Image (cartoon, rainbow, N blue to C red):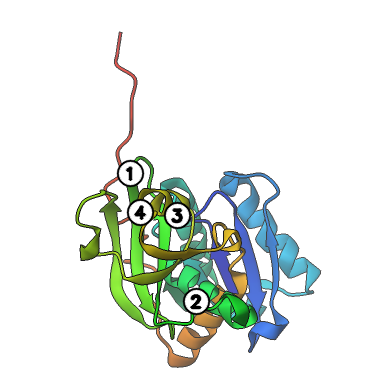
Amino acid sequence: MILCIDTGSEWCRVSLCKNNTESLVSAHSSLPNSHSATLLPLVRDLCSQEGLAPADIRAVALSAGPGSYTGLRIGSAAAKALAFSLNIPFIAISSLEILALHSLAFLNQNPEKKPSEPFVFLPLLDARRQEVYMATFQSSGNRIIADKPLVLEEKSPEEWLPSYAVLSGSGAPKTLALFPNHQLLFYPELVSPDSSVAMAKIALSRYAQQDFSNPKTFEPFYLKPFYLNTSPKI
């Protein structure tokens, strides 16, 4: 049994998967940006619902960023604590990789929406202002470009913008608006999806390969330094 934790967006999501994604069960917070209050109760209630004890959890997987600083810190602290206390493997997964795999599953389930010409997946997470976090993946789901922050500019987008791409994530709408003349395919279902199944699929694969992270040294994939705005002293 693998526990999956996703706190990188405004919604706190947890899921439990056994040896395949068909047996996935999940839950999410009813209020946005309530991770500190809802994460551990969601884990507790989901385990209770399935009749599981903490000892039944074999690994904990974390959507490790990029994403919300606060959400990532809360999810990381909880996942690391569980990995230490239960002495189980810790699996860190890129939030952009999860989005890309979810997009692949979405197109496989809706073949009429799949592009007829070669394309790539372009997951984008809103980093505020004119910035996004981005990566690119082949149509098969294999990575092309590593996760990175990007300032959206109207000039020279060819350096990072593929000729034909399927967009997903919270940064997709503003990217689409800025480059209306490019061949960018976008579906509203991919803006803020519940990608629990995609995350579970990656976690199960990493678990089978024993591809684990060290919770002692792990830091979320912030990609940018954290700046705290403070009011000037009077």
Numbered disc 2: secondary structure: helix
- Among numbered discs 2 and 4, the one appearing first in the sequence: 2
- On the image, numbered disc 2 is attached to which residue? 101
Q: Neighbour class for label 3 at 10 Å: few (<14), some, many (≥20)? A: many
Q: Residue at x 66, y 79 (%)?
A: 56
- On the image, numbered disc 4 is attached to which residue? 179
Which of the two marks, 2 or 3, is nearer to us in this view?
Answer: 2
Numbered disc 4: secondary structure: loop
Q: Disc 2 residue type?
A: Leu
Q: Neighbour class for label 2 at 10 Å: few (<14), some, many (≥20)? A: many
- Among numbered discs 2 and 3, the one appearing first in the sequence: 3
Residue 171 visible in the picture: yes
Q: Disc 1 residue type?
A: Gln
> Which quadrant of the rendered structure holds the N terminus?
bottom right
Q: Residue at x 46, y 72 (%)?
A: 100
Which of the two marks, 4 or 3, is nearer to us in this view?
Answer: 4
Left or right side of 161 for 197: right
Q: Nearer the viewer, residue 23 or 79?
A: 23
- Among numbered discs 4 and 3, the one appearing first in the sequence: 3
> Which quadrant of the rendered structure holds the C terminus?
top left
Which of the two marks, 2 or 4, is nearer to us in this view?
Answer: 4
Numbered disc 3: secondary structure: helix
Q: Disc 3 residue type?
A: Leu
- On the image, numbered disc 3 is attached to which residue? 72
Question: Which numbered circle lies on residue 130?
Answer: 1
Q: CA distance from mark 3 to mark 1?
A: 21 Å
- Among numbered discs 1 and 2, the one appearing first in the sequence: 2
Residue 60 visible in the picture: no
**Residue 158 position (above or below residue 11):** below
